[in-house]
Amino acid sequence: MTAERPTVAIVGRPNVGKSTLVNRITGRRDAIVEDTPGVTRDRKEVEADWAGRTFTLVDTGGWLPGGTDLDAKVTKQSEQAIAEADVVLLVVDTTVGVNDGDERMASLLRRRGGPTFVVANKVDSEHREPDIWEFATLGLGDPVPVSAIHGRGTGDLLDLVARALPAAPEGVDPGPAADHGGAQGEDAFSVAIVGRPNVGKSTLFNRLVGEERSVVHDLAGTTRDSVDTVLETDGGRVRFVDTAGLRRRGKEAEGAEYYSLVRALQSIDASDTALLVIDATEGVTHQDQRLAERIDAAGSPVVIVLNKWELLDDERKAEVQHQVADMLAFLTYAPVLKVSALTGLGVHKLLPALTQAEEAYSRRVPTAVLNRVVQAAQAAHPPPNAKIQYATQGAVHPPTFTLFANRDLPPTYLRYIERKIREHFELGPTPLKIRVRRRGG
Ligand code: GDP
Ligand code: GDP
């Protein structure tokens, strides 16, 4: 984070058109264009402007000259250029399609995070445009079609790049940069404990805090007058959102009111994960259901706690479990824990369940494996009159998958694919999103 000019690194296999793209962008011919694949070149830095932004373009040579096999290694220059760059352009050749080298580079870039664009080069005409979607499987977002040689699409590409650059001192609005979740703030994941009054939230929370014998600190919360509690646990830091009302012991009627629905909804929105506490002696009520719907709509993972479990006889236990399956059916993915905040029964399972939910919520799956899973599912049970060509995970929080298909897919079929993806990648306790994109339009 220096005050220096932002840098844009251009990476990709030999011969995909990196130098041609640099020449196109700078309007000069100072990058060397070689026709021999694999020729190592020096890292070239040239200045470029777009939309009032000046940045340094770093053209990397790509790969070292091939060794005995095609186990292409990224050159030192490329590695360094990638590490230092604010934005990375991975150039690929649409006339060739995805190959090993592209995949390796993409996997490196996915780990890096930060704004990255897949530049699908050599789209010299509209006819080639459908071919770019194959590169969506690289898991770096929608490919951007360009023809470096003719200049087709390069303006749009530069618009995207300019928006993804770090905020400009000139006051240029950086706009909605690519959604890659920066590495800043290695923060604890956050949990909202929600439920109707008197279900046992405070009792549960105080037991959690007490039982863990962990370091606990209170922090100013995200909303005014709110307090968050951070627990240092074996599974990492967990931040419980808006806990002032929960920590207050021997609270009065005012305390019960504290966790009004509005407050609960705010804390759901302010946190990654929700812990929905239900009073098992009363079963699932309409209000519990409303809260659950709200959590589901927020797209957060949820752990359901059936509290006061020690008070139930076997018959009632079965009844309540049926109620959960029935009334909270839309939360099929949510783990259901039976606990007694009063006696401590089952409480130790809570933090691990939350940690797992959070982990699944943030999971990124390998594109190649994802495509194998989707293709296997499709082979076992083909969609009616349609075909899924590729699948890619576009985002996390929650894991969001895009299926590229030649036709629309019915909801039942999407649920089937969702189940397969969920099973294979053990995405258990998190919600997922599946979108379909008609390829070629
Ligand atoms: P680099 O090795 O990635 O830097 O690739 P170059 O810029 O040297 O280009 C490799 C070859 O692809 C050259 O013959 C270019 O003329 C050709 N090329 C680059 N961009 C395009 C393009 O947009 N369309 C077509 N058809 N060919 C291109
Ligand atoms: P909150 O309003 O959701 O924070 O609920 P509280 O934690 O204040 O609990 C409400 C009442 O339920 C209190 O009287 C608690 O002692 C009682 N309670 C909480 N958890 C349990 C439990 O697991 N078993 C039983 N029997 N009572 C509980």
Image: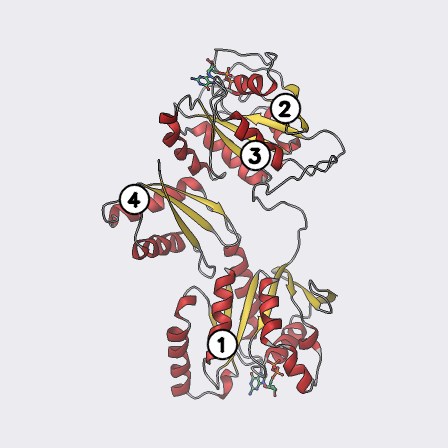
Dot 1 and dot 4 residues touching (CB under 8 Å): no
The picture quadrant where one finds residue 134 is top left
Q: How far apart are marks 3 and 2 (CA)?
A: 15 Å
- Residue 205 in percent (x, y) is at 63, 75
Residue 231 in the image: above or below residue 344: above
Q: Secondary structure beneath disc 1?
A: helix
What residue sits right under mark 2 in the picture? 57
Residue linked to disc 1: 288
Task: Tell me which numbered mark, 1 or 3, is placed earlier along the sequence.
Answer: 3
- Residue 130, given in percent of the width and then of the height, sits at 37, 32
The three-letter amino acid code for the residue at tag 3 is Leu
Ligand 1 closer than 8 Å to label 3 CB? no
Quadrant in which ligand 2 is drawn: bottom right
Q: What residue type is labelled 2?
A: Leu
Which color scheme did the rendering employ for the protein? secondary structure
Residue in the picture at 49% in, 26% down: 153
Q: From what the image shows, is residue 96 above or below residue 340?
A: above
Type of amino acid under label 1: Asp
424 and 277: which is toward the camera: 277
Q: Which of marks 4 and 3 is nearer the N terminus?
A: 3
The residue identified by callout 3 is: 160
Query: Which quarter of the image is occupied by the N terminus?
Result: top right
Mark 1 neighbour class, 10 Å CA radius: few under 14, some 14 to 19, many 20 or more: many
Q: Distance between the residues labelled 1 and 3?
A: 44 Å
Q: Where is residue 98 in the image (x, y as percent from the top left)?
A: 41, 30
Numbered badge on residue 407: 4
**Amino acid type at mark 4:** Arg
Residue 341 image-quadrant placement? bottom right
| Mark 1 or 4, closer to the camera | 4
- How packed mark 2 is, by other alpha carbons closer than 10 Å (few <14, some 14-19, many 20 or more), is many
- Sequence-wise, which precedes: disc 2 or disc 1? 2
